[in-house]
Image (spheres, rainbow, N blue to C red):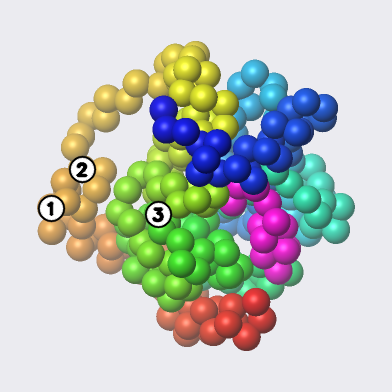
Amino acid sequence: MKNTSKEYPAALSSLMKASSGEKPTLAFVIFPGMTPLDMIGPATVLEVGGWLNIEYVWRDLLPVRTELAHISFSPSITFEQLDKVDILCIPGTGNPYAVLSELDMLDWIHKVGSKAPWVTSVCTGSILLGAAGLLKGYKAATHWSMVDDLNEFGAMPVNKRVVIDRNRVTGGGVTAGIDFGLTLLAEIKGEEYAQAVQLAMQYSPEPPFNSGMPELAGKEMTNATLQTIFSNVEQQTPNYKEILIKSAKRISDIY
C-alpha cells in the first residue's frame, strides 16, 4: 500500500486524533430523490468495526424520500447542528440538476467540505460537490452519462470506478459505492483492514453480463440508455442545461 501519511497528512492527522478519543464523524448528506444504494453501499462498508460515528444530515429531521418509491431515510442531524466532520460524503441521484436549486444544502457542503479532512462522493454526488465549489482543479469520477458535466465546475473528469486526488475521493455510478467505500477504508485504516471487511461482506462480484460501461456495452445500447436517462431528466427538469450553467456561474460568484 502506498504511504498515505505523506500524501494526506492533514486528513490522517485529524482521524488519528479522533481515534485516540472520540470517534471520527462521517456525514452523508441526504436529499430528496437521492439514490439509496449510493449511500447504503459505502455506509455498510465503512461502519464495520464501529470505528466511526455516522450522521445523516439534512435541513430538518423529517423523512427524506429517495428516488425509489416508498423508501425514505430519516436524518439524524440538521445542517445547523453539524458544522464539522472528518469525512463528508455526497450520494448521487438520477437527476442531480433538480437538486442544484437546494442552495442551503450546497452552501453547507461548501462550508463543511472546505475544512473536512476527506471530501467524497458517489455517482452524481460529485456534481453536487462541484456545484459547492469543492472540485475545481481536482480529478473526479461520476456516472458515465454525466461525466462531461464535471468540466462545468472546473473538475477534471476521469472515467474510473474510484478516483483519488489528494483528499478528494469520488466513486463512479451507483454500484461503485462499495468499491469507493473499500478504497477509502484502505486509505484510512490500511489495506489489510479493508480486505477483511471485503471478506466479511463476501464482496466478490460476478455480474451476469459484461455491459456495465459504455465501452463494454457498445454504441447502440449506450445511446439508447443515454436517451432513456435524459428523457427522464427532461420530464422532471426541462431546463436542466440552463440550471447546470447557472450553477457553474454561481460558484465563481459566491465561492
> What residue sits 59% from the left and 51% below the top?
119
Q: Image check: 231 left or right of 58?
A: left
Outermost residue to the right: 81
Which residue corresponds to mark 3? Answer: 141
- Mark sitting earlier along the chain (2/1): 2
Secondary structure, mark 3, is: loop
Q: Image check: 252 left or right of 209?
A: right
Disc 3 + disc 2, Cβ < 8 Å: no
**Residue type for callout 3:** Ala
Is 113 contained in the magenta span? yes
> Which label belongs to residue 86?
none
Along the line of sight, which residue is nearer the eye, 243 or 150? 150
Q: Distance of mark 2 from mark 1, alpha carbons?
A: 8 Å
> Which label belongs to residue 218?
1
Residue stretch in magenta? 107-119
- How crowded pointer 1 is (Cα within 10 Å; few <14, some 14-19, many 20+) is rated as few
> What residue sits 20% from the left and 57% below the top?
222
Disc 2 + disc 1, Cβ < 8 Å: yes
Q: In the image, is residue 178 above or below residue 80?
A: above
Quarter location, residue 230: bottom left
Along the line of sight, which residue is nearer the eye, 45 or 17? 17
Q: Distance of mark 3 from mark 2, alpha carbons?
A: 19 Å
Along the line of sight, which residue is nearer the eye, 9 or 196? 9
Q: In the image, is residue 58 above or below residue 18?
A: below
> What residue sits 48% from the left and 73% below the top?
153
**Residue type for callout 2:** Ser
- How crowded pointer 3 is (Cα within 10 Å; few <14, some 14-19, many 20+) is rated as many
Which residue corresponds to mark 2? Answer: 211
Q: In the image, is residue 1 above or below residue 121?
A: above
